[in-house]
Image (cartoon, helix red, strand yellow):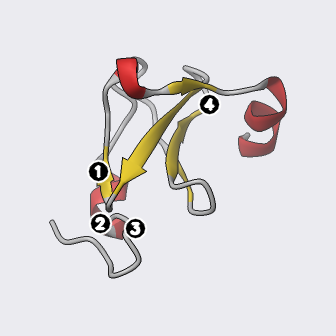
Amino acid sequence: MESTRQGHPDTKLLELLVCPLTRTALHYDRDRAELLSVKARLAFPVRDGIPIMLVSEARQMTDQEVADAS
């Protein structure tokens, strides 16, 4: 799948991806270049348009980030 020129992932790819832990839908945060899993409270990085779907690479979301993404 191709990524856009700005390093954002392909929107069709984003529609197919789910959280590797919870198998729930992800929300893309364009400003931070992260895929958010509200249920798992994890933010997966997107580097050069490629989603990094490893739990070991994800960061914990704050309570405020979870509330904002819900």
Q: Nearer the viewer, mark 3 or mark 4?
A: 3
The number of discs equals 4
The residue shown at (40%, 67%) is 8
Marks 2/4: CA–CA distance: 20 Å
- Seen as rendered, the residue at the extreme bottom is 5
- In the displayed structure, 52 sits above or below 2; it is above
The label on residue 8 is 3
Residue placed most toward the observer, 30 or 6:
6
Binning the other alpha carbons within 10 Å of mark 3 as few (below 14), some (14 to 19) or many (20 upward) gives some
The residue shown at (36%, 68%) is 11
**Label 2 sits on residue:** 12
Residue 57 rendering spot, x and y as whole percentages: 39, 26
Please say if the residues under marks 1 and 2 sit with CB atoms less than 8 Å apart.
yes
Binning the other alpha carbons within 10 Å of mark 1 as few (below 14), some (14 to 19) or many (20 upward) gives few
- The mark nearer the N terminus, 3 or 4, is 3
Marks 3/2: CA–CA distance: 12 Å
- The mark nearer the N terminus, 2 or 4, is 2
- The mark nearer the N terminus, 1 or 3, is 3
The amino acid sitting under disc 3 is His
Q: Is residue 11 left or right of residue 58?
A: left
Q: Nearer the viewer, mark 3 or mark 2?
A: 3
Q: Is residue 64 left or right of residue 23?
A: right
Corner quadrant of residue 70: top right
**Label 1 sits on residue:** 16
Secondary structure at badge 3 equals loop
Residue 26 rendering spot, x and y as whole percentages: 48, 42
- Seen as rendered, the residue at the extreme front is 48
**Label 4 sits on residue:** 38
Residue placed most toward the observer, 57 or 64:
57
Residue placed most toward the observer, 5 or 29:
5
